[in-house]
């Protein structure tokens, strides 16, 4: 049985990973101006941020699964990082569904220091061989547990018992932006019992990404992800400059927040961010629906003439773990049948699910 351990944060061991040029790619439809990328990398190179992640938001070679390609190819990303980061560790994101091990190996030979492999917790046992191959191909491999909150903390030890001990760390990922600090504490404390290095990646659907990242560090995580100005997928991520400033208030200026603030302003000025749909992001956080499915939900709810909230909740009820497209389509069919039922005597209008 797992027991919570009391952790006193050693701020000297804490790292912030900046993923503006990876997670931020969603916010600009995977289109970065190369001159902006070079300027931002130059700024990050001289900053106190120790880890920088770049590339396509979904991961290396996402276009092999039909995703829109980024305007900067992964080989070009590697060249930019090598040219502008002055030796600072940089990495990319991967998913077993489409990222080839040989691509990871090739980029590692070009200077890539780490790869973060993302998958849902229940998919980990089937992808142990992939993790082992990645470890043979890259100096540092992190496991990102996407949609962590769809899996109960007590289930994680059984799902992670085949993860190689050689991984550089394991990430708790609040993909839905749904966690509150108590949730973060429970998940981080659980995973901390299994692996020595824990990271946290938070989304800001409910405005909690910064405080959740702090909660993770107080619970024993040693890496927190951030994006400058909080620019990331959907509602965004924890903000790099804010995390640095909060740590300064709590301990000391480990990450030189005053140098990060102008970089955040650069991102605010130069990145033309796609407007978010606040209704969908709030609903998705509370109900547990990933923002990648929002276009399908909006289309399906319009076709079924039901509220997006009803469709999301019905899809979530149909899923054992994280809802997917099949659950959304099934929910639409179910709700269509519901609103099409014949009226009973005394009814004045067809029933609409609430």
Image: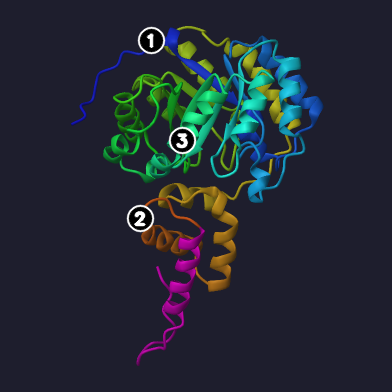
Residue 336 inside the magenta-drawn segment: yes
Where are the magenta residues, as a range? 325-354
Q: Are marks 3 and 1 in contact (CB under 8 Å)?
A: no
Q: Secondary structure at mark 2?
A: loop
Residue tagged by mark 1?
A: 10
For numbered disc 1, what is the local secondary structure?
A: loop
Q: Name which quarter of the figure residue 39 lies in.
A: top right
Name the mark on residue 129.
3
The residue nearer to you, when weighing 293 against 2, is 2
Which quadrant would residue 73 be assigned to in this image? top right
Tell me how far mark 2 sits from mark 1, CA to CA.
38 Å
In this figure, which residue is indicated by the disc labeled 2? Answer: 320
- On the image, the x and y values in percent for residue 180 come to 37, 36
Mark 3 or 2: the one toward you:
3
Whether residue 30 sits left or right of residue 183 in the image: it is: right
Query: Of marks 2 and 1, which one's residue comes earlier in the chain?
Result: 1
The one nearer the camera, 86 or 61, is: 61
Q: Is residue 239 visible?
A: no
Counting from the top left corner in percent of width and height, residue 220 is at 35, 20
67 shown above or below 15? below
Residue occupying the point 47% across, 44% down: 176
Residue farthest left in this picture: 1
Q: Is residue 95 left or right of residue 221?
A: right
What residue is drawn where x is 51% and y is 8%? 254
Q: Which image quarter holds the C terminus?
A: bottom left
């Amino acid at each position: 049985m797992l027991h919570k351990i009391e952790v006193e944060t050693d701020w000297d061991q804490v790292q912030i990973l900046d993923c503006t040029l990876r997670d931020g790619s969603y916010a600009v439809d995977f289109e970065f101006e190369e001159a902006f990328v070079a300027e931002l990398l130059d700024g990050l190179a001289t900053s106190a941020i120790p880890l920088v992640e770049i590339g396509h938001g979904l991961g290396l070679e996402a276009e092999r699964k039909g995703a829109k390609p980024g305007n900067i190819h992964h080989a070009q990303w590697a060249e930019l990082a090598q040219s502008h980061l002055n030796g600072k560790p940089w990495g990319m994101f991967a998913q077993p569904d489409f990222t080839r091990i040989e691509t990871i190996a090739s980029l590692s030979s070009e200077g890539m220091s780490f790869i973060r492999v993302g998958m849902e917790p229940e998919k980990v046992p089937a992808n142990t061989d992939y993790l082992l191959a990645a470890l043979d191909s890259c100096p540092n491999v992190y496991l990102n547990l996407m949609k962590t909150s769809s899996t109960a903390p007590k289930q994680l030890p059984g799902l992670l018992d085949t993860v190689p001990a050689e991984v550089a760390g394991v990430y708790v990922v609040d993909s839905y932006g749904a966690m509150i600090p108590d949730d973060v504490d429970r998940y981080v404390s659980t995973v901390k019992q299994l692996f020595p290095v824990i990271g946290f990646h938070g989304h800001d659907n409910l405005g909690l990404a910064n405080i959740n990242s702090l909660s993770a560090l107080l619970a024993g995580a040693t890496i927190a992800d951030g994006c400058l100005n909080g620019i990331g997928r959907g509602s965004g991520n924890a903000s790099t400059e804010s995390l640095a400033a909060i740590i300064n208030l709590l301990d000391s200026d480990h990450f030189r927040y005053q140098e990060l603030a102008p970089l955040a302003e650069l991102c605010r000025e130069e990145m033309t961010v796609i407007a978010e749909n606040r209704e969908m992001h709030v609903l998705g956080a509370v109900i547990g629906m990933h923002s990648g499915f929002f276009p399908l939900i909006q289309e399906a709810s319009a076709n079924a003439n039901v509220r997006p909230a009803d469709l999301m909740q019905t899809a979530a009820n149909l899923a054992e773990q994280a809802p997917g497209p099949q659950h959304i389509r099934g929910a639409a069919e179910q709700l269509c049948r519901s609103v099409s039922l014949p009226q009973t005597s005394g009814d004045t209008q067809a029933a609409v699910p609430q």
